[in-house]
Amino acid sequence: MNLTGTYQKNNLGIFPFLLALVFFLDGFSQNNSGHLNATEIRSLTFKEISDLENQAWNQDNMVQLRKLTQAHEQKAKAENNNIEIARAFYYRALFEEPKIALLYADSIIQVTKNSNHLNYPTLGYILKGHIFYNANNFQDALNNYLEAYNMALAKENTEQQREISLSIAAIRNLNGQHYAAAELYKRSLKLLMRQNNFESIHYEEFIALLFNLSTTHLRLQEIDSAKYYVKNGIDQSLIFKDKLNFRDFVMLDAQINYYDKDYLRAKDTLLKYVDSLEGTNKAIKLYYLGKIEEKLGNGMLSLRYFENIDSILSETLDPFIEIKDVYQQLIFRSLLNEDKPKQIEYMGKLIYYDSILSTGQEDILNKATISYDIPYFRHQKKKTEEQLKAKSRYISYAGILAGFSVLSGLVFFVRTRRMRTRLNLLLEKGPIIQSIAPVKNLRPPSTVPEAIRIDILKSLEEFENSDRFMRADLDLPSLALELETNTAYLSTVINSYKQLSFPNYINDLKITRAINRISDTPELLKFSHQGLAKHFGFKTAGSFSAAFYKKTGVTVSEFLKELNFRKNNTSFINGDM
């Protein structure tokens, strides 16, 4: 799938920004470098060799790049320099076929796995992510980006964090998580703007972020925000006399004009530039031309644009989100014309491309939901574990002095008694109210307008009384989209009125539902912990058990054991046994 075809400016088909992570180049070059033999190349410094490799790459001289990487690898191995071996592998991966490139990426990870270097082995995972991305394997791409992000976070490499975030955002955008993607882009932009002279030194990355933010806000129908970033993009491309990016931003401006219902202005701009495009990029602009003609009442011309898109897709096999609308229009026209063969053909294509766009979205949604938060949680978890280990050593020492066996016996007794008390209370107070009532007498959050707060609370009440929170793939961006609000407003309302974070809020609803249903449905007592977890919308038995204990103070095992005991005793008393 073409990234620019889905309104992403990141060019993950090449890896230019990674070159900066491999080496900071200072312009070294030799005009006669192509005449150097392997021995002469090995006599150069590693910095000089890398500069020549970068020069060969920029000049698209793959023969020279191959010769340089071979000498680079030989010199690095002779000197037992694992970082330089990894750099040689990286440059080698640039011109190899994907399968071979993946092997080199794995080799980078392997030779640097114990390195304290700021960029390694993170770079190997980033490289794998890009290779999988270009093969449309977004699940494996995301897995490697997340692995890389964890490492970049642990090593406090903000540059890598920023670059990886862009890649994750691209995947989230492709899979419909536009709110989440916008937040990632904005965070990356803030990080970038901390750099001195970022507009010029990091121009390509800056212009890409402006483009991605423009298109993402267009997807969200947030026209004013899209206009803001488009204007910035046009201004920057004019300053740097960048005709290509200027054209792209002007065409984005035409799409904004379409949503503003300024159809003639949008049409003039698109017609001026559309023939300079090809593939998916051209198909997307033709889509807007088709929609404009449809709005202007030119049905036949609109149809021709859609037929042209169908022809392009037959060659690229690269669908974009609006393609569903294209084929629905073509199917409708074929129905009117009673053209059965075309009707069948277009219906088949609609089903096929819809399946491509939908494949793996659920798994990606699950992983992408935590792609930006979990690394922080893990980072904090590690610190907490270290603190707990230190505390544990102290407690162990104190326990030995005080008499460990007596203390542990007392703790076990108290814990068991508390568990039994909580269990009795849980089972004897009857059905639990499903909805989490808003906490009263709270000062309303000033950041959320009153009318929006009221709408969100009403929507949440309906949501809590439904089964929609039972989905395992539910996240804050998808619920915000479902409730027709944004993540910032929704998160603020939940935190303020429910006094819970979003994950705890959802877990609270799920565990409440689980307690009610398990108590009332004896068949559920036959389920394993994993079966119950899946039934109530948890991904793992561990997450289900942890959430259950956090809410009730009782383990799932004890709860099920007590229910089974009461069920059997009731059956015995009633003469069923």
Image (cartoon, rainbow, N blue to C red):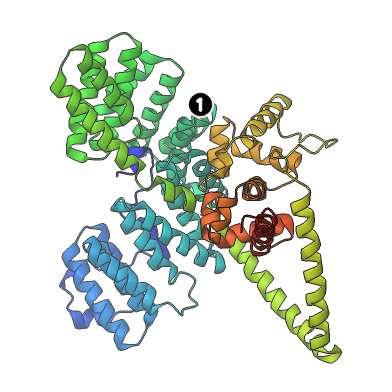
Compared with residue 153, is residue 72 higher up or lower down, i.e. above or below? below
Occupied quadrant, residue 307: top left
Let me know if residue 490 appears in the view.
Answer: yes
Q: Nearer the viewer, residue 190 or 23?
A: 190
Q: Residue furthest top?
A: 297
Residue plotted at (54% across, 26% down): 224
Q: Residue furthest left?
A: 341
Q: Position of residue 456 (x, y in %)?
A: 66, 31
Occupied quadrant, residue 452: top right
Residue plotted at (53% across, 39% down): 478
The residue under label 1 is 223
Q: Nearer the viewer, residue 165 or 476?
A: 476
In the image: residue 55, left or right of residue 386: left
Compared with residue 366, is residue 103 higher up or lower down, i.e. above or below? below
Compared with residue 495, is residue 463 higher up or lower down, i.e. above or below? above
Sort mark 1 into few (<14), some (14-19) or many (20+) by Cα contacts within 10 Å: some
Residue plotted at (54% across, 33% down): 482
In the image: residue 162, left or right of residue 132: right
Label 1 amino acid? Ile
Q: Nearer the viewer, residue 16 or 338?
A: 338
Let me know if residue 203 appears in the view.
Answer: no
Q: SS class of the residue under badge 1?
A: helix
Q: Position of residue 16 (x, y in %)?
A: 35, 56
Compared with residue 105, is residue 494 higher up or lower down, i.e. above or below? above
Question: Which quadrant of the figure contains the C terminus?
Answer: bottom right
Number of residue marks = 1
Q: Position of residue 347 (x, y in %)?
A: 23, 28
Question: Which quadrant of the figure contains the N terminus?
Answer: top left
Q: Residue furthest front?
A: 575
Q: Position of residue 338 (x, y in %)?
A: 17, 14
